[in-house]
């Protein structure tokens, strides 16, 4: 039995394969590998998804679900994107526990109270992720946003993407200390710089796993952590099972009571 819950972002299996087979095709694989959550990706649906059928299939496997959309929460005008309502409705129809978005163009002075009016009471929790962009992948605007949301009593959280910080040259350890109190979901990926200077996500080495364990110490024990790096093999089940086992073993389990520090 795994110590900590692990999610699989279906983008890990490659966009072409997932679009070809359909996201529902991977549910059996995830369960057999020991994952407890599936992250569905809006951009990997070939058309309008049959949310009722997909929700039923996920529930039948007793998986949790996160619905990920590339939506930027704050538009370039500094306003909440009105498409958020449609994304939340889709997440609800899928039976998702959370909707994952990126921060977008938040800046001091943005009307977070206006965002509060778009968020329903019960239903999927809004999780805001650090992405790879200048506006959404830097520590300061994320910290300002989450602090303001907390001050207003908004029920939302953060998806902390370990690898994405590298695109903006932000230190992940520093980000974890400053933002850890709001983290509800963790995206795990190692990052490699190619000869042409581009950064790409890659599977972790032993040193990466050690670094991730240190980062997880800044978050609530037992936080769900997700595979979001390439999973390619002739035996996808064996590979996925190994990655689930590796991530599950990292950090303290939910039964631990020591709180992380956020100096």
Image (cartoon, rainbow, N blue to C red):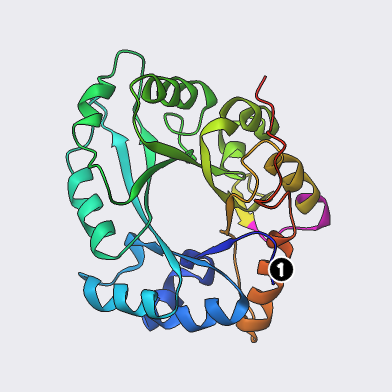
Q: Position of residue 70 (x, y in %)?
A: 35, 49
Front one among 205 and 68: 68
| Residue projecting furthest to the top | 109
Q: Is residue 135 left or right of residue 87?
A: right
Q: Is residue 193 visible?
A: no
Q: Is residue 2 above or below residue 110?
A: below
Q: Position of residue 143 (x, y in %)?
A: 49, 23
Q: Which residues are magenta?
A: 202-208
Q: Is residue 17 left or right of residue 251?
A: left
190 in the magenta segment? no
Front one among 32 and 131: 32
Q: Quadrant of the N terminus?
A: bottom right
207 in the magenta segment? yes
The residue that label 1 is drawn on is 245
Q: Position of residue 150 (x, y in %)?
A: 41, 24
Residue positioned 45% across, 74% down in the render:
62
Q: Quadrant of the C terminus?
A: top right
Residue positioned 31% across, 64% down in the render:
95
Specify few, some or many for label 1: CA neighbours under 10 Å numbering under 14, 14-19, or 20 or more: many
Q: Is residue 20 above or below residue 47?
A: below
């Amino acid at each position: 039995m795994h110590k900590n819950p692990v999610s699989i972002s279906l983008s890990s299996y490659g966009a072409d394969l997932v679009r070809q087979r359909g996201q529902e095709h991977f549910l059996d694989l995830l369960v057999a590998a020991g994952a407890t959550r599936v992250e569905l990706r809006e951009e990997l649906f070939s058309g309008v998804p049959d949310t009722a059928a997909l929700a039923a299939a996920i529930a039948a496997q007793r998986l949790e679900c996160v619905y990920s959309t590339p939506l930027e929460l704050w538009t370039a005008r500094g306003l909440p994107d009105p498409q958020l309502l449609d994304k939340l409705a889709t997440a609800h129809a899928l039976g998702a526990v959370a909707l994952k978005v990126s921060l977008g163009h938040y800046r001091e002075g943005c009307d977070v109270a206006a965002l509060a009016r778009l968020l329903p009471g019960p239903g999927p929790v809004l999780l805001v992720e650090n992405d790879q962009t200048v506006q959404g992948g830097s520590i300061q605007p994320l910290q300002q946003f989450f602090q303001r949301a907390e001050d207003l009593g908004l029920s939302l959280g953060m998806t902390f993407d370990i690898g994405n910080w590298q695109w903006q040259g932000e230190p992940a350890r520093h980000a974890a200390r400053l933002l850890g109190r709001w983290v509800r979901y963790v995206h795990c990926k190692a990052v490699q710089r190619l000869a042409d200077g581009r950064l790409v996500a890659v599977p972790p080495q032993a040193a990466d796993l050690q670094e991730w364990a240190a980062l997880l110490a800044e978050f609530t024990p037992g936080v769900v952590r997700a595979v979001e790096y390439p999973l390619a093999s002739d035996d996808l089940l064996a590979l996925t099972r190994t990655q689930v086992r590796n991530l599950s073993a990292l950090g303290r389990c939910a039964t631990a009571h020591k709180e992380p520090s956020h100096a």
